[in-house]
Image: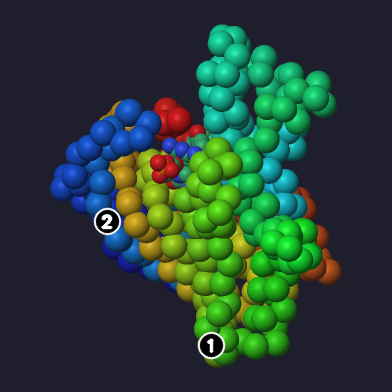
Amino acid sequence: MPSAPLSHFEHQYLDLLQEVWDHGDERRDRTGVGTRSLFGPSMRFDLSGDAVPLLTTKRVAWKTAAREMLWFLTGDTNIRELVRQKVHIWTDWPLDRFRRETGEEIDRDTFEARILDDDAFAAAWGDLGPVYGKQWVNWDTYEPVGDGLFRKGQPVNQIAQLVHDIRHNPASRRLLFTGWNVAELGGMALPPCHMTYQYHVAGGRLSGMLWQRSCDLGLGFAFNAFSAAMLLRMLAQQCDLEPGELVWSAGDAHVYLNHEHLVHEQLARTPRGHPMLKIGRRPDSIFGYRIDDFEVLDYEPHAHIVAPVAV
Ligand SMILES: Nc1nc(=O)c2c([nH]1)NC[C@@H]1CN(c3ccc(C(=O)N[C@@H](CCC(=O)O)C(=O)O)cc3)CN21
Ligand SMILES: O=c1ccn([C@H]2C[C@H](O)[C@@H](COP(=O)(O)O)O2)c(=O)[nH]1
């Protein structure tokens, strides 16, 4: 049965957008663009059935978000593979570094073409540092070899460990993984925003919480909410559980001042439809999913809204 309009999941997002725009503290942020910001909001999304919190008040490139999530799970931190899949959302940071360090005024398409064509260029300029994927599946460890010396130990695969723990110790209060490796933050293009994920099993259902320290409500949120739900669904499938709830909570939730048009346009639109995310196949492991395994149904969103990304 279609539910009453006010119960649509997306109203939580639209209400927050309005709240931040109307009452957020206006400040100059790291990027120089300026934001309005509120601290500590949260939202809850019911993922039962195949429900997925994919925004409908603008078209969201969910396949781009899905490709990014699958890329994280490979442990890769170089944008080359994303660019090869025509995912451009991470290009601006390496491009910015390239321009700053070489003084060359290269455009984005040329930069991406060089990343694809030139191995050495990709290795030198395409890497984001030890960001999400590195920490999720290859967190470095060190073991003493005497005299104050250490050598690298076996890296920790937090995701494999998580799947094991959900399966074998579902009552655990330690079902979590994090990208926030304090010792390695300095080498990252950006410290993780969607930084910590925790899970909870009850009544045959897997629920998850994402703690996002910093959220760009106009651009990042749509990707982060979809990806967190997608990952939860994959974990549930691997652990023979039904999806429960996704709890999203943020530290600094902000709207960039140059997203004013997006705020007004989205708030003028009415959420429509109840998007569903289908997974067509059950791979042998959490690392075995491919983009073609995912399909979104009942998605007839309002038109896309172009908004600049603050670098
Ligand atoms: N300011 C800022 N916002 C973010 O959301 C963000 C960052 N920086 N830095 C790191 C990553 C990169 N992410 C991004 C970057 C760009 C888009 C973006 O431009 N999205 C457009 C077009 C998507 C497409 O390529 O089709 C959108 O309308 O959603 C989204 C997420 C999320 N993160
Ligand atoms: O997944 C993501 C990644 C990034 N963001 C946003 C949040 C902020 O607007 C910037 C990061 O800047 P910091 O100064 O490091 O907070 O990127 C996002 O919303 N989601």
Q: Residues within 10 Å of mark 1 (few under 14, many from 20)?
A: few
Identify the image quadrant of the C terminus. top left
- Picture coordinates of residue 114, whole percent (x, y): 74, 19
Q: Is residue 101 left or right of residue 120?
A: left
Which residue appears farthest toward the left when viewing the image?
Answer: 23
Observer-nearest of 266 and 85? 85
Quarter of the rendering containing residue 176:
bottom right
Q: Is residue 147 above or below residue 54?
A: below
Disc number for residue 202: 1
> Callout 2: helix, strand or loop?
strand
The amino acid marked with disc number 2 is Phe
Identify the image quadrant of the N terminus. bottom left
Observer-nearest of 121 and 14? 121
Observer-nearest of 60 and 25? 25
Q: Is residue 253 left or right of residue 295?
A: left
Residue at horizontal 67 percent and vertical 14 percent from the top: 110
- Picture coordinates of residue 144, whole percent (x, y): 74, 66
Where does label 2 land, which residue?
A: 39
The amino acid marked with disc number 1 is Ala
Q: Is residue 111 above or below residue 34?
A: above
Mark nearer the N terminus (1 vs 2): 2
> Callout 1: helix, strand or loop?
strand
Q: Is residue 33 above or below residue 46?
A: above
